[in-house]
Image: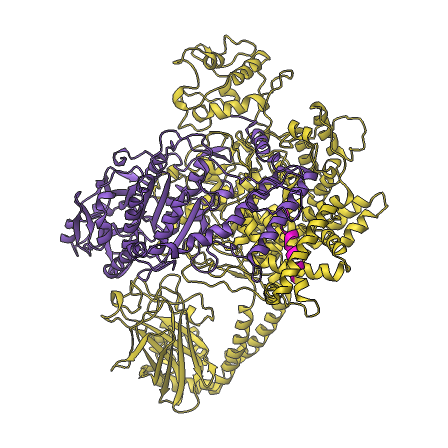
Chain colours: A yellow, B purple
């Protein structure tokens, strides 16, 4: 395959600077292992099933193996080294690798191995699996470039290569760079001039400290973290329904802002729920375990999805903390790295305790704020007061009970069919009332519908309503629903009397489909409902028992509304309502009294035990007429409590259950249960757990990850911080530290940073600050021709990086320049403008995107509603991750679709107009002064003469045209919700809006340099 | 292994664009820049034209482009392409357990499994006598062009993962779709349209399938290879329309100014990414003209509109077929048309016929139209879904089924008028010449001159390919 040639491509660095210089000794890790990994490990590596000739070259024992009179490698002796003899052989039948492997060794690769053997064949373990130790800081002569130890490591390498660092960038560039890196927002012109004119010797450090302390820092860091852990607002698979997890996002933002140590941050996410005396915050953090994609697809098999979820978690922890491709060992032992299939499933076993639904909506957990907790406490106290009355026996009650018992023994619930006075379909179905009082839907069969029925019940009071759904030959699959399989989904049933909605004390049905309980019809949430699979084609009954008697007039006038919004014709085709005034309880299955009460009733009062006496008296008090006011009071309080509870924020958290069995699935096949059950362990090549006397938990895993001995985690994390500060990692393959990954360009620096990070309490801000204070960070990013030729990929950092802003920050930057950005930190996701119909492909149920109006329209990109299957198109165009899988490194593409977004997306057109308003208000009265102001705002620098000349012409031309067509100017000024200002001339503002569009579209505007 | 490949690519990129975008005094955005803005300033813009990761195909290609008629939901092979008289005889009898024991099953889990007879009659069409359901009279009329495969199998039994499997060769999210792979491997032939275009339509006879954008995502391949969804309402390509109140020549001035200012900045910082940005704006600018022109069907003669059975670009499957031909003419590499209503769990007799009517004429017209223009030979057409449906009934419908289903291919290197493979006599499992999804992918790549084992991309240390670790080219169906 030809090297990637064209532009606009992200170039992923797979292998770093792994090349032996002719004068330096061969280094096994740098020079030899990559060759063996690429060429030999496939057949002579960790995968024991694929291993040929029982020879493995990925371990020291294997590589130096002696058997049958042969030695693979004899240090210093080429002729006796069978490995060398075979790779250097002229005989095709002898030579390794064999042609059918599709692999070859180049002459220089063979030479490298030759030199390594000649030089004594010193072996080292793979660098990333060796515990890092703090290396000595290179001794380099003092120079203005050197600001801290980082620079000594960098300069040492530059000197080796005959490269010189670039000069320090000017102050305006520095503050823009720092501001974009730390806040994801540009500096204001005032901030720029304050910094440029700050004569304090510590001006730069003060600035870094100030920016690190802004709340926007946490938001900026969250953008990066949320990609790793695949945070989203929707479940992912198939119907991709919404779920609440924004409290987790708030936790991430707050943790970065509070500078929570990274080890604690890791532990809380993996196992916050297992920490002793855990706080709400820690439980919210444990929502990390629930961020993966889940399904609600009908017919999905639980076992299959449990297997998918388990594997997903291993892949994620592997990528986030270990930069290891553990996922490769799901079906076979890893081809390149020391991870076996057994270890993969043993890793899964850490998560075997998580309570979750394999198929269906995941259970949200309420997370009240402290104020809400207090309100709930007060309500509970009031309820308890009334409850005490309800729980207290009295003489009056005893005699009432005796009367009731007599009546109860002969009781029968009598249902009176309610014939609708009127039956209306909202979406045009024909509803006809049949002779038996039932209602049949025919004709138009809309996707969703609401039926409204009015009834007059000839009773003074009603205690319950009954809904029968009935089969009919005219319906698909005989009904009772109107969709193909006879099913339906009743989202909500609302009964209103005199404009007041009825509350229910019990809702029961003869049958409910899994995940579609009858209780959903009265939960006030349209997204959940009652359905009846697999019992379509048969009648079913639902009974709604009123919390207090319905109606005080005779006849009682009822309006019943059936909401059926699920879509795809999941509406009811045939049904009937009845009512009763029988005493409670009233249940769908016909049981008049709970079984235990019925049993006690059958015993003569004087033959009952004390317990039975108390039980039946207690029951009687729940239905005694004299206690009705108390019960009403309780019902009212409970309703208030319910409303409050409905308003509580919810999230997904980790909750434990007894660990389920985790088996090795042969070749990843979930149908195959022949594999052995495994218990939680970590890969042996990375060390071991200290737990021996019990089953290890997620908490043990978390502690193991952030232990001082773990060779990977600190390196992985500081490498990613490095990427934030320089645009690429010291190990360019941020996601893979394995033998197929890149080697570190500066291995000593990486280890030094990792050790420093751990020894200083995993302090993230401290580590970032160290990087930002370095002379390396402060360099100019402009590369002169010679430097670019010598180091095209900027591996050695003789200059800073230049790169496009991340998707969210492209948006934030434009809104900030237009001063539209709303600075509120945290809270639920928001919905900015999105093209109409973009969600047309979502179904079950169908959804329409309703954009927010007001402040939520102008929030930062990271708060945008993250719909996995249809991510907001402007974010997607700029390479935002869909968060279906872990993304460690977003591509940085440069495409025509991005141009279309910046040119035409209403968000950017509106931001341009707001920017133009700023220019006119802040930029003085001449075209030139305005252009200068615009450049200061957007680019933190003055405009050059040729730029001023060009933009002046744009303003002039556009002004002429808008003056000739003020209606068009007005149209442009009305893109977006922001009102057009009344005090500015329409044509002038429109012309400047065009100039502002030009500036917001500049490469420089969306580039951090 | 070439540790310097990346650096070389950067250097090459620089040679491609660096010089040409440098130097005030030489800037003439060839197609659009107007020198009146800044006399004496001209830049030359080359559109960044990806020519493919393969410098040349592995063998002579037969197909240049593909139009994939993707029938989402899982069309029943038993009512469309695979007639099973024995199943008709067994109507109402229990499905023999020997077929179903230990096999994956979807909504029929735990239920009694009963044979459900084919709901529509079949007919032999054309000289080849291909056996196709009577619900496809138009497709039947081009039977001699079709290769019907009756032995497809896949791995995922629920829609979402099955779509992902059919499009990317795996059920794990984050892998590139086949259209992305083809564009990555071969490049695009169009300068002003994306190389991978997706359109959708839905009908009235099924539960419209949710289709995630994942199905045309470029996964770990660069975003430029991502499929672009064309919409039937609003802007056909998102954000391709100018802002309200801005006239065409005003927009042109805005774009020209951006280009010139970017070029001026490049004189100061000499950054190759700027050249790419300039090229991207050039293409974007062209799209603002080429896309509206593409979807404007008013230039199509009446007899062509009638052939497809459409009045204009109305979002119907027929209209999309006509648009697919226009995209093919303009050099788009991979065109995928979804029809989303094939999930017939109930009322299959009525619904499969209704859905068939919605796609029948357009699909057949596409074949006829391409043929009369001499384009069929180099355009591969595939008609099929993510899986088939059970021979067992589910009320009046059928459940999902992965052990045997059908699809057809035509054009670009495919032998017409033949059938390949077969299911058992009840239409349950593919038993003869089984074609796995990986095999289908291998065959598609083969038709484009690509050895499926050699089109790879290194991600997370491994060379990934569309066919994962499997795939055999289905040789007997090649022309």
Q: Residue at x 33, y 57 (%)?
A: B341
The quarter of the picture where the C terminus of chain B appears is top left
Q: Where residue B183 sits: x, y (%)?
A: 44, 40
> Is-magenta flag for residue A419?
no
The answer to whether A78 is drawn above or below residue A450 in the figure is above
Q: Please tell me how many numbered marks the rendered image carries.
A: 0
> In the shown orientation, is residue A179 left or right of residue A548?
right
Viewer-closest of A317 and B238? B238
The reply to whether residue B294 is in sight is: yes
Q: Main secondary structure of the magenta part?
A: helix
> In the shown orientation, is residue A374 left or right of residue A504?
right
Q: Where residue B97 sits: x, y (%)?
A: 21, 48
Viewer-closest of A814 and A208? A814
The answer to whether B199 is drawn above or below residue A535 in the figure is above
The reply to whether residue A695 is in sight is: no
Q: Where residue A328 sits: x, y (%)?
A: 46, 36
Q: Residue B62, located in which quarter of the rendered image?
A: top left
Q: Where residue A310 sits: x, y (%)?
A: 46, 45
The answer to whether B433 is drawn above or below residue A31 in the figure is below
Q: Residue A597, located in which quarter of the rendered image?
A: bottom left
Determine the residue located farthest toward the bottom in the rendered image: A554
Tell me where the magenta segment starts and ends, as one range: A990-1003
> Is-magenta flag for residue A994?
yes
Q: Residue at x 15, y 53 (%)?
A: B88
> In the shown orientation, is residue A338 left or right of residue B121?
right
Q: Residue A435, located in which quarter of the rendered image?
A: bottom left
């Amino acid at each position: 395959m030809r090297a990637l040639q064209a532009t606009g491509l992200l170039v992923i660095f797979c292998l770093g600077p792994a090349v032996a210089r002719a004068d330096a000794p061969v280094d096994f890790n740098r020079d030899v292992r990559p060759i063996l990994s690429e060429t030999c490990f496939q057949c002579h590596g960790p995968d024991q099933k694929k291993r040929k000739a029982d020879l493995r070259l990925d371990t020291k024992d294997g590589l130096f193996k002696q058997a049958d009179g042969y030695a693979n490698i004899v240090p210093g002796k080429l002729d006796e080294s069978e490995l060398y003899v075979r790779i250097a052989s002229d005989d095709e039948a002898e030579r390794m690798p064999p042609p059918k492997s599709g692999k070859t060794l180049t002459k220089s690769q063979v030479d490298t191995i030759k030199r390594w053997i000649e030089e004594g064949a010193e072996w080292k373990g793979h660098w990333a699996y060796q515990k890092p130790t703090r290396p000595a800081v290179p001794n380099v002569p003092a120079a203005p470039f050197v600001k801290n130890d980082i620079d000594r490591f960098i300069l040492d390498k530059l000197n080796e290569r005959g490269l010189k660092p670039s000069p320090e960038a000017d102050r305006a560039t520095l503050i823009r760079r720092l501001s974009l890196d730390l806040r994801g927002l540009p500096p204001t012109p005032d901030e720029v001039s304050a910094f440029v004119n700050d004569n304090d010797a510590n001006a730069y450090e003060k600035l870094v400290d100030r920016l690190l302390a802004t709340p926007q820092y946490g938001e900026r860091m969250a953008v990066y973290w949320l990609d790793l852990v695949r945070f989203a607002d929707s479940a992912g698979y198939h119907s991709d329904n919404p779920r609440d997890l924004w409290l987790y996002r708030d936790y991430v933002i707050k943790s970065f802002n509070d500078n929570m140590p990274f080890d604690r941050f890791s532990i809380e996410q993996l196992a916050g729920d297992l920490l002793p005396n855990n706080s709400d915050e820690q439980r919210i953090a444990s929502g990390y375990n629930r961020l993966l994609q889940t399904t609600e697809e009908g017919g999905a098999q639980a076992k299959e999805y449990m297997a998918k979820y388990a594997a997903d978690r291993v892949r994620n922890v592997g990528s986030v903390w270990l930069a290891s491709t553990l996922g490769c060992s799901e079906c076979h032992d890893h081809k390149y790295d020391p991870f076996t299939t057994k270890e993969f499933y043993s890793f899964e076993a850490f998560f075997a305790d998580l309570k979750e639904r394999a198929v269906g909506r995941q259970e949200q957990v309420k997370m009240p704020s402290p104020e809400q907790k207090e309100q709930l406490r007060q309500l509970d106290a009031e309820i308890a007061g009334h409850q005490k009355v309800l729980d207290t026996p009295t003489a009056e009650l005893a005699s009432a009970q005796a009367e009731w018992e007599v009546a109860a023994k002969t009781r029968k619930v009598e249902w009176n069919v309610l014939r609708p006075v009127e039956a209306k379909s909202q979406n045009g179905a024909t509803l006809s009332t049949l002779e038996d009082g039932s209602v049949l839907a025919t004709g138009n069969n809309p996707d969703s519908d609401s039926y409204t029925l009015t009834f007059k019940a000839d009773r003074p009071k009603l205690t319950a309503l009954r809904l029968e759904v009935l089969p009919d030959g005219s319906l698909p699959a005989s009904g009772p629903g109107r969709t193909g399989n006879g099913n339906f989904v009743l989202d909500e049933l609302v009964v209103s009397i005199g404009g007041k909605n009825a509350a229910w004390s019990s809702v029961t049905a003869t049958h409910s489909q899994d995940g579609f309980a009858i209780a959903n019809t009265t939960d006030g949430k349209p997204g959940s409902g009652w359905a009846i699979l697999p019992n379509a084609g048969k009648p079913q009954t639902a009974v709604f028992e009123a919390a207090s008697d319905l109606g005080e007039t005779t006849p009682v006038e009822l309006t019943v509304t059936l909401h059926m919004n699920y879509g795809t014709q999941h509406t009811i085709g045939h049904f009937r309502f009845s009512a009763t005034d029988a005493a409670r309880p009233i249940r769908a299955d016909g049981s008049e009294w709970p079984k235990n009460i019925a049993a006690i009733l059958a015993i003569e009062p004087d033959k009952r035990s004390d317990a039975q006496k108390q039980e039946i008296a207690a029951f009687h008090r729940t239905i005694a007429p004299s206690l009705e006011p108390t019960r009403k009071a309780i019902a009212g309080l409970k309703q208030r409590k319910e409303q409050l509870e409905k308003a509580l924020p919810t999230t997904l958290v980790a909750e434990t259950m007894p660990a389920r069995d985790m088996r090795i699935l042969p070749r990843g096949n979930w149908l195959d249960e022949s594999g052995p059950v495994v218990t939680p362990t970590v890969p042996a090549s990375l060390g071991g757990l200290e737990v021996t006397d019990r089953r290890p938990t997620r908490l043990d895993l978390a502690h193991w990850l952030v232990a001082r001995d773990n060779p990977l985690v600190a390196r992985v994390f500081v490498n990613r911080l490095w990427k934030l500060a320089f645009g690429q990692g010291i190990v360019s393959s941020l996601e893979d530290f394995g033998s197929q990954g890149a080697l570190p360009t500066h291995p000593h620096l990486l280890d030094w940073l990792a050790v420093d990070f751990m020894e200083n309490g995993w302090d993230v801000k401290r580590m970032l600050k160290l990087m930002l204070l370095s002379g390396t960070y402060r360099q100019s990013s402009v590369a002169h021709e010679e430097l670019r030729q010598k180091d095209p990929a900027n591996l050695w950092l003789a200059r800073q990086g230049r790169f496009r802003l991340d998707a969210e920050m492209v948006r934030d930057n434009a809104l900030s320049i237009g001063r539209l950005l709303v600075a509120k930190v945290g809270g639920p996701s928001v919905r900015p403008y999105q093209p109409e119909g973009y969600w047309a492909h979502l179904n079950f149920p169908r959804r329409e995107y309703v954009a927010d109006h007001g402040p939520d329209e102008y929030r930062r990109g990271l708060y945008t509603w993250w719909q996995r299957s249809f991510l907001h198109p402007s974010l997607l165009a700029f390479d935002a991750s869909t968060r279906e899988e872990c993304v460690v490194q977003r591509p940085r593409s440069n495409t025509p679709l991005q141009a279309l977004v910046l040119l035409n997306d209403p968000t950017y057109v509106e931001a341009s107009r707001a920017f133009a308003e700023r220019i006119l208000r802040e930029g003085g009265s001449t075209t030139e002064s305005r252009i200068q102001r615009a450049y200061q705002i957007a680019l933190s620098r003055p405009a050059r003469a040729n730029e001023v000349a060009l933009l002046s012409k744009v303003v002039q031309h556009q002004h002429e045209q808008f003056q000739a067509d003020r209606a068009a100017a007005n149209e442009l000024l009305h893109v977006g919700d922001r009102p057009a200002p009344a005090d500015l001339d329409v044509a002038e503002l429109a012309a400047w809006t065009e100039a502002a569009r030009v500036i917001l579209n500049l490469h420089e505007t969306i580039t951090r340099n | 292994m070439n540790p310097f490949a990346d650096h070389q690519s950067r250097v090459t990129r620089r040679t491609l664009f660096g010089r040409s975008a440098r130097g005030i005094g030489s800037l003439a955005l060839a197609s659009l820049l107007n020198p009146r803005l800044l006399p004496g300033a001209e830049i030359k813009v080359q559109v960044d034209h990806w020519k493919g990761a393969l410098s040349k195909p592995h063998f002579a290609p037969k197909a240049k482009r593909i139009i994939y008629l993707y029938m989402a939901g899982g069309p029943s092979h038993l009512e469309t392409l695979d007639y099973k008289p024995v199943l008709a005889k067994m109507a109402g009898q229990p499905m023999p357990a020997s077929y179903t024991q230990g096999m994956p099953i979807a909504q029929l889990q735990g239920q009694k499994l009963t044979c459900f007879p084919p709901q529509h009659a079949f007919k032999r069409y054309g000289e080849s006598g291909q056996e196709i359901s009577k619900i496809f009279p138009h497709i039947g009329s081009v039977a001699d062009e079709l290769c019907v495969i009756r032995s497809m199998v896949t791995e995922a039994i629920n829609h979402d993962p099955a779509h992902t499997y059919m499009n990317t060769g795996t059920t794990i999210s984050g892998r590139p779709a086949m259209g992305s792979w083809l564009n990555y491997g071969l490049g695009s032939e169009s300068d002003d349209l994306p190389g991978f275009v997706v359109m959708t339509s839905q009908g009235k006879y099924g539960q419209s399938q949710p289709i995630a954008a994942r199905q045309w995502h470029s996964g770990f391949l660069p975003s430029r290879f991502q499929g672009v969804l064309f919409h039937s309402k609003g802007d056909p390509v998102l954000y391709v329309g100018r802002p309200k109140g801005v006239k065409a020549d005003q927009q042109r001035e805005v774009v020209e100014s951006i280009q010139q200012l970017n070029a001026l900045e490049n004189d100061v910082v000499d950054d190759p990414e700027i050249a790419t940005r300039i090229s991207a704006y050039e293409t974007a600018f062209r799209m603002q003209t080429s896309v509206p022109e593409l979807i404007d069907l008013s230039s199509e003669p009446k007899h062509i509109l009638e052939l497809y059975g459409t009045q204009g670009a109305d979002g119907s499957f027929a209209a999309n077929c006509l648009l697919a031909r226009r995209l093919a003419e303009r050099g788009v590499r991979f065109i995928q048309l979804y029809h989303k209503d094939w999930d017939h769990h109930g009322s299959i007799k009525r619904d499969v016929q209704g859905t068939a009517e919605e796609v029948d004429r357009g699909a057949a017209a596409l074949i006829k139209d391409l043929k009369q223009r001499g384009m069929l030979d180099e355009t591969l057409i595939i008609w099929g879904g993510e899986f088939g449906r059970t021979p067992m009934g589910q009320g009046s419908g059928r459940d999902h089924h992965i052990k045997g289903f059908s699809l057809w291919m035509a054009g670009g290197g495919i032998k017409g008028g033949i059938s390949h493979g077969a299911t058992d006599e009840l239409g349950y499992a593919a038993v003869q010449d089984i074609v796995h999804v990986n095999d289908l992918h291998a065959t598609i790549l083969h038709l484009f001159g690509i050895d499926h084992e050699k089109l790879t991309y290194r991600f997370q240390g491994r060379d990934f390919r569309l066919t994962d670790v499997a795939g055999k080219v289905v040789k007997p169906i090649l022309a």
